[in-house]
Image (cartoon, rainbow, N blue to C red):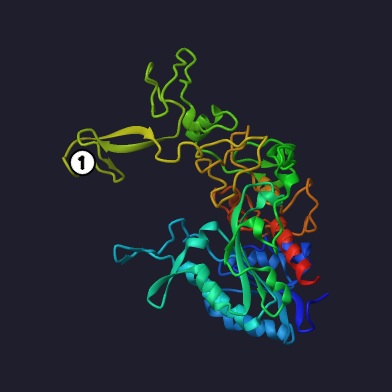
Amino acid sequence: MTVFDEVSNHSISLFSGGGIGDLGIEYGANIPIIAFCEVDKNRRKLLSNNYPGAKIFGDISEEKKNIIKFAKNKLEGKRPLMITMSPPCQGMSTNGKGRLNKGKQDKVDKKNSLILPALQIVNSLEPEIILIENVPQMATTEIPLRGKMENLLKIIKRRLKKYRLESVKMDFQDLGVPHKRSRLITIGIRKKNKLSKLIGKEMVVNWSESKVLPLPDESIISDNTPLHLASMIGDLPPIEDGAFDANNSLHCSPKLNPWHKKIIQCTPEGKSAWYNNTCADSNCSHENELKSSRCGKCRKFLLKPLVKKKYCGKCKLEFNKSSSSCETCGGNIRFRRRLVKGFKGTSYKRMSWDSIAPTITLNSGTVSSDNKIHPDQNRSLSVLELSIISTIHSDRINLPWESKYSFKPFVNKKELLKCSSIPRDVIGESIPPLAMWKICEKIISIIQS
């Protein structure tokens, strides 16, 4: 079923990553994706493997004309139903990268401006629906345009004159995704569609005010939610760091260094190794302060995040170079262990079985990152566990795309045991397909009503 005779029931995915979120469009909302655009060659391999019938394009800055030409030929002049995009978010911050500071322009991440050719594609193909997904900080991000810095959302609204648009901050856990993931969803509906009037004049609106996006599910938000870690991954067989489950190669986790493993072994569920204040020597067991790196009684190192550094015993400056004497005062170089400089509350922290998983990031394999340690095993989550809480696979949630997605050709031992492997990176960057399905399902139901 299509909206108008000139609209084809197809979608185009820009900044596609590995196509994980697109599972919710292709198999959930039943909207075939005819074209993907992704600059990274490894992610293009994943797209080719999982969507063999679609056309895969590279750098959007170079391929925008080819994408437009292909879509018009493929759809025989009709307009696509939807164009989705998840532009790069690494350069976006709360303060807005690229703001003017004392008359000087801060360093601007050029990736923030890659959305501009995507808007040209939208204006040329005129899809009925636009869906843009990014971090909440996108609302305050500024990019250089015509010699000055401008807010990205204002640029989008100004350039997409044929659309009514709204941006809403959502947390996908409230839609049934079993991990916390706060994102900014920007929706556009063509003004010629009378239902676009459901979108008000304000660009940024509160989630509760949106009439075109699915609202939080109260049954999911309750304390009795079935989405806790224990429900989602608690029945998986235990594995050691650096080892594979014999029945599933994705159930593996990077090997820890000896010190990390030692401090994690003494870190209880739901706690951070920063709070290992009790001396581990059973003959001492002295209780120390949070800022302490050594036991105040026996002087042994506490099982906390420590780093070994070179420093000058006289002026106390640290050195990374292989120097034998201080470059400043000529004093002798010594070695010392000190507390790692980091976030003392979320880094080196175990998850809790009775809580929804924290946000999955690119650092999912690094136990020193925020909330990345398994609740009771001494490791980070496996790729299989990440896939489950990202709703790529699940035996707890009914997913129409179950067994439809594979990480081939990146399932070899060397790749999977990396802290930053291709599967981990792709999962960390992707919109969970369950969230994409629910968003698209709501919008399509409105458009086709």
User: In this view, which residue lies farthest toward the left?
Assistant: 329
Q: How many marks?
A: 1
Residue nearer the viewer, 8 or 407:
8
Q: Quadrant of the N terminus?
A: bottom right
The answer to whether residue 54 shows anywhere in this view is no
User: In this view, which residue lies farthest toward the top?
Assistant: 283
Instruction: Determine the secondary structure under disc 1.
Output: loop
Q: Is residue 417 left or right of residue 407?
A: left
Q: Quadrant of the C terminus?
A: bottom right
Residue nearer the viewer, 249 or 329:
329
Residue topped by disc 1 = 326
Relative to 307, residue 446 above or below: below
Q: Is residue 117 left or right of residue 95?
A: right
Q: Amino acid at mark 1?
A: Cys
Residue 338: quarter of image: top left
Identify which residue is drawn at 40% across, 64% down. Answer: 98
Residue 107: quarter of image: bottom left
Relative to 312, residue 435 above or below: below
Identify which residue is drawn at 43% across, 57% down. Answer: 95
Q: What x and y, as percent, mark residue 305?
A: 45, 34
Q: What x and y, as percent, mark residue 80?
A: 71, 78
Residue nearer the viewer, 368 or 342:
342
Residue nearer the viewer, 131 or 314:
131
Q: What x and y, as percent, mark residue 430?
A: 62, 58
